[in-house]
Amino acid sequence: MGAQSRDVFLRWCWVSGAVVVLLVVLLVSPLDQPAREQVSMAAIAAAGVVAAISCGHRAVLSIGRRRRAWATLSLGGVVGLAGNVYAGLVGNPETGDVAYIAALLLGVLGLSLFPAVRPRGRELLRMLLDSVVVGGSVLYIALFAVALQADGPQADPALTAYALPVVDALLATFAVQVMTRSNAAERVPLVLLGGGFVLYAVADVAFALLSAQGSFTFGSPVDAAWVGGYLAIALAARHPAASGSPVVGRREAGTPVLGTVVTFCLFLAAALVRVGQTQASHQTLPWVANVLWVAVLVAVVTRQILVVVDNESLRHGLERRVQERTAQLRSLASERARTLESVADGIYGVDTEGHVTFVNTAGAYTLGASASDLVGRDAHATFHAPAHDGTPLPADGCYIAEALRDGLTVTAEQDLYLRPDGKEVPVEVTASPLRDDGIIRGAVVVFRDVTERREVERIKDEFVSVVSHELRTPLTAIRGALALLDSNALQDSPEQAARMVRIALTSSERLGRLVDDILDTERLEAGTTQLHLAEQPVDTLVAAAVDQVSVLADEAGVTLEATGSPEIVRADAERIVQTLTNLLGNAVRFSPSGGTVRVTAAPVGELVELRVTDQGRGIPPDKLEAIFRRFEQVDASDTRERGGSGLGLTIARSIVERHGGRLWAVSDGEGTGSSFRFTLRRATPHPATAPAHTPDGTAQATRVVVVDDDQYVVDVLRTVLEERGYDVVGLTDGRAALAVVEDEHPAAIVLDLAMPGTSGAEVLSRLRQSAATADVPVVVLSGTRPHDALETAALADDWLVKPVDPDRIVETVRDVIRRQPHHGRVLLVEDHEDLRTVVATVLRNAGLVVTTASTVDEARGALAHGADPDLVVLDLTLPDGSGRELVADLRRDGRLRRVPLVVYTGAEVSSKERADLRLGSTVFLTKGRTPPDAVLRSVLDLLDVAAGRDVGRPDQPDQPDLLDPLGTTEQLDQRDRPDQPGQPGPHPSTRPR
C-alpha cells in the first residue's frame, strides 16, 4: 500500500469517526423527538448510500470473485437502505424487517465470495455450528429480554423479531471466520466488514428488544450503530487492499481462537440467562425459546464432539507423519552411509575444532586404521607427516584450518599422510568447508592415494633419463668420430681414420637398433602390433634363429646346439624368431669362449615349452624378474662391454605374452649359467595323446552322434552342429548307433526315442548298462515330455521336446559336454570359511584341482610354492588386504599375467574398477545374485576358452591367441545371468552327473 493511498484511507477513517461521534451527540442532545428522528433517518440514508456506492466502486476496480463479492455487498446495502427509508416513511420500523433480513443474507453471500483459504470439511462444519451457537445464544437472550419486558406472554413477538438477530449473528460469525482464514494483507478490509456486521447485530438485537416492548422509534442511540455499520463497510471498500491479489497455493490461515472465544462467551451469557430464568420460575418464555435453547445445546455438544474427533484424527495424522519422517530420515542416513562407503576415495569430516567426526571405509583402509580409532582425533596432528627435519607442520597453514577459518576450498592439494604403522602415503586432497545457513560448521576432506601414480611418474622419469643416456652415448661417439674426420686431423693416419669410420658406423647401427627396439617395445605393450598366426614347426623357428645368431656365436667361440622336436605351435613366425634371436644373442654374449648354448623344446600339456640354456655367469635370484624391465642389467657395465640395447628381454616377454604364453628365467646364482624358458600353445595334439579312434585328426571331444529315424532331421542337426565346430555322425538305426558309440566313444549323443526296430529308449538303457558307454552324455530329442517317460528321463542327461530351436540344441549339447569332469587347476581365494568350502566342493565335484587360500599372504605363498593355476577365483575383501593386491602381483608375474580370473565378491564392481582388475579373460560375479553352481559355469567357460575348447559358441574366434578378453567377458556375463531366456540346462527329471 503506497503512502498516498494510506493517507487517503486514514482521512476517510477520521471523517467516518467524526460523523459517528457527531451523530451520537445529536441523538442524546435535548432536541425534540421529531428532530432526532429526521437526523437519524438522514444519517442512516446517507451512510447506506455511501456504503453502497463504495462497495460498487470497489467492485468496478476488482476482478473475479472479489468483483462479485463487492457487487453483492453493494446490492445488500441498497436493499437495507430501501428498508430503512420505507420504515421511516411509514413510521413503523418493523415494516422494514424483511428488507433487513434480505440485505443481511446478501451480506452473507458476499462474504462467501471472497477468496480465502478453503476450510476442510470438518472445519467448515465447525464454523457453521459456531454460527448456530452464536445466533441461537443471541436470539435466546433477546427472547428472554422480550419475555421479561413484556406485560405478559399473551402475544408472541413477530417472527421477524426473532429471525433478525439470528441472521445478524450468522453474518457476524461468518465474517469473523472468513477474516481469520484470509491472507494477512487482506485482513484489514475484512475486519472492517466484520466490524460493520457486528454493529448491525448489536443494533438489530436492540431493535428486537425495543420492538418487543413496543417502544422503538427512530432517533435513539441505536441508530448510531446502524450508521457505524454502514460506514465500516464503506471504509472496508475504500481500503487499498480491498481488491486483494490472486490466491496462489495455500495462504497462511488465521487463528480460530477469536471466533471460539466469541462463540463460547455468547453461549455462556445465554446459559446464565437460562439459569436466571430457571430461578425466576414465575417467568414463562415462549415455546420458541425452549426449542432454540435445545438447538443451541445440540450445536455445542456436536461442536465439541467434532473438535474431539478432529483432534484425535490430527493426533493420528501427526504420529503417522512423524513415523514417515523418521523412516525418511533413517533412509536418508542409510543412503548417505552407503554413498560414503561405496566411494573409492577416502572421505573424512571434521568439526570446527578440527577433530574427525566420521571416516568412510576407503579412507580408514588407506590410513591403516579403523574408523572408530580415528573419530575424535585431531585431523592435522594425526594425518600429516612431519617435515623433513622431523618437526610437526604448523596447523595454521593447513588446508583444514583454511577451510574452517576462511571458508576456502582447496583442490588437488598434494600431501603426505602418516599411517599408525609409520608408513607414509602420498595423497591428493580436496578440502571444502561445511556450511549451514552461511555459518561454517566443519569441513569435509576427500583424499586419494596416489602411490601408484607417483610410481608411474618415477618409472617414466627413469625411462626418459635412461633413453636419453642411451641415445646420447652413440650420438656422442658418432659426432666425435665425424668431427675428427672433418678436421683433417687424421689425414696422415689412414688407419686411425678408418677406425673412426668404423666407430661412427657401429654407433649409428647401435642407435638404429635402439630406436627400433624402443618402438617395438611401445607397440607391443600398447597391443597395436598385429600377429600373423599360423601353424609353425618348432624346428623351423629354432633353425631360423640359430642361423641368425651363428655369426655372433662363431665370433665369440660359442657352440649352438638345437635338439630336434616334432612339435607344431600356433605362432607368428617372425616374432617368435625375434624372441629366440634375442635370447640366443644374450646367451652368446654372456657365455665364455668354448661354452655351449642349447635350445630344446618339449610338450607340457596343451603347451610347448622352449628353453635357451647357457653356461655363462648366471643370474642372482633377486634379479631373475628385474632383468625383464627396460634397460635393466645384472651389471650396469654390461651394455657398454657386451653390447645390446637393454630392451631385448622386455621385447621377448611382450611377444610371448601376446601369444598367450609366458617367459621366465631360471638360475641357481652366479657361476651356474642360466636358462630362459617360454611357452607357446601347441597347434596339434601330441602323438601320445591322440585318440586311436580318430585317424583323421579330429579332436575326440567334439564328436557328436545324432540318432533319429528321420533322415531329414539328421541332416538338419548335422548341419547345425557342424557349423558350430562339432564332428557329427548321423544315424537312423538304433542298433547301428550302439555299435558306433561303442567304437567312437563320442563326446555326446542326440537321441530320438521313436525309432523302428531298436527304439531310442532301448538304446539309452543299453548304453547305461555298459561300463564303456555309461558316462557318455545323452540328449533326448522327443515329441513326448519327460514326465510321461520317467524311467527313460532318469537315464538322460537332458531332454528337449520337439519342435525345438536349433540354437537351443547346440547350447544343450555344449552344456552336457561341459558337465563332464575337468582337470584344470584353480586357485580359490575366499576369506569366508563356509563359502570357501562350498565353492571348493562344487569345483572339485566337476573334476577340478582346487587350491584354497583365505588371505592375500596365503595366496602368495601358494603361488610361491608351485601352485600354477589355470584360473583364479578371487574375493576382493580379505582380512589382510584387498584382492587387488593379488591381481597386481599376478600382473607382475609374466607366467600368470594372462591367467583367467573370476572376481566373486559381495559388492558390485564399477566399470572403472573392472578395467583395473582384469588379467586374462575376466568375469565379475556378485555373491548376492550368483550361487556357487553359477560360479562353476563361469569357471568352466573360461577354462574352455583358455584351452581352445570353446566349441559350439556362436562367435567362436578363429584365432584364440588374439581372443579379446573384454569380448569374452561380455559373452560370459550374458550366459551367467540366471534370468537369461533360452538357457538350456538339465531337466529336473533327468539324471544328475
Image (cartoon, rainbow, N blue to C red):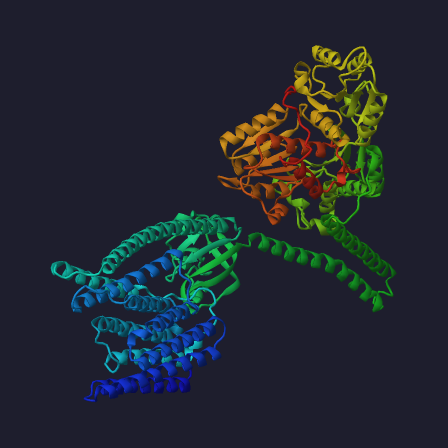
Q: Nearer the viewer, residue 980 or 349?
A: 980
Residue 563, can we see it? no
Q: Residue at x 27, y 63 (%)?
A: 263
Quadrant position of the N terminus in the picture: bottom left
Q: Nearer the viewer, residue 64 or 977?
A: 64
Q: Nearer the viewer, residue 133 or 819?
A: 133
Residue 283 shown left or right of residue 711 in the figure: left
Q: Residue at x 66, y 14 (%)?
A: 791
Residue 755 shown left or right of residue 342 in the figure: right
Residue 358 at what x, y percent from top left?
42, 53
Q: Nearer the viewer, residue 107 or 531?
A: 107
Residue 402 at what x, y percent from top left?
44, 67
Quadrant position of the C terminus in the picture: top right
Residue 290 shown left or right of residue 512 in the figure: left
* Figure check: 85 above or below 583: below
* Figure check: 240 above or below 939: below
